[in-house]
Amino acid sequence: MTEKPQSGELFGVPYNFDRPALGRMVGAYWQPGKGMFVEKPFGIGYTLNLANWRSWIVLAVAGALFYQQKHADEASEPADEPVEVVVEE
């Protein structure tokens, strides 16, 4: 019986199911000279390259949107007061 490959590419999307190592994990997220997206150290697809300045902009925008949504949800909570409904016939 042949062994299945633990890493490779399927339909242009990289995958890697080798046992993760600390050095490989750190090295995968910090690759100076590479683009904004790099192959994930474990799993399927791509991840952000933290050595690229564009990745920090993406993280800042995502954090700002999360912060805005969290505070908008807190402000829009309904009060525990009864509501009067008027029905006209």
Image: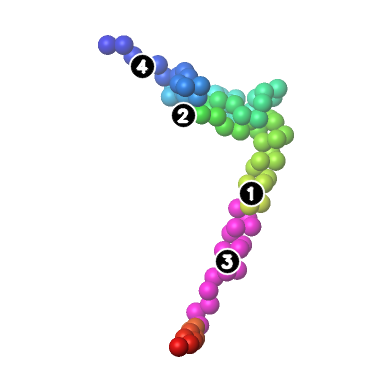
Q: CA distance from mark 1 to mark 4?
A: 39 Å
Element carrying mark 3: helix
Q: Return the x and y of residue 72 as percentages of the image width and height.
A: 61, 63
Q: Tell me if mark 1 has few (under 14), some (14-19) or many (20+) residues whose alpha carbon lies within 10 angstroms of its own.
A: few
**57 lies above or below 64:** above
Q: Is residue 49 left or right of residue 85?
A: right
- The magenta-colored residue range is 66-81
The earlier-in-sequence mark between 1 and 2 is 2
Q: CA distance from mark 1 to mark 2?
A: 24 Å
Element carrying mark 2: strand
The earlier-in-sequence mark between 3 and 4 is 4
Residue on which the image places disc 1: 63
Please tell me which residue is depicted at 63% across the width and 55% down the height of the picture.
67
Residue on which the image places disc 2: 43
Identity, as a three-letter code, of the amino acid under mark 4: Lys
Residue on which the image places disc 4: 4
Question: Is 73 included in the stretch rendered in magenta?
Answer: yes
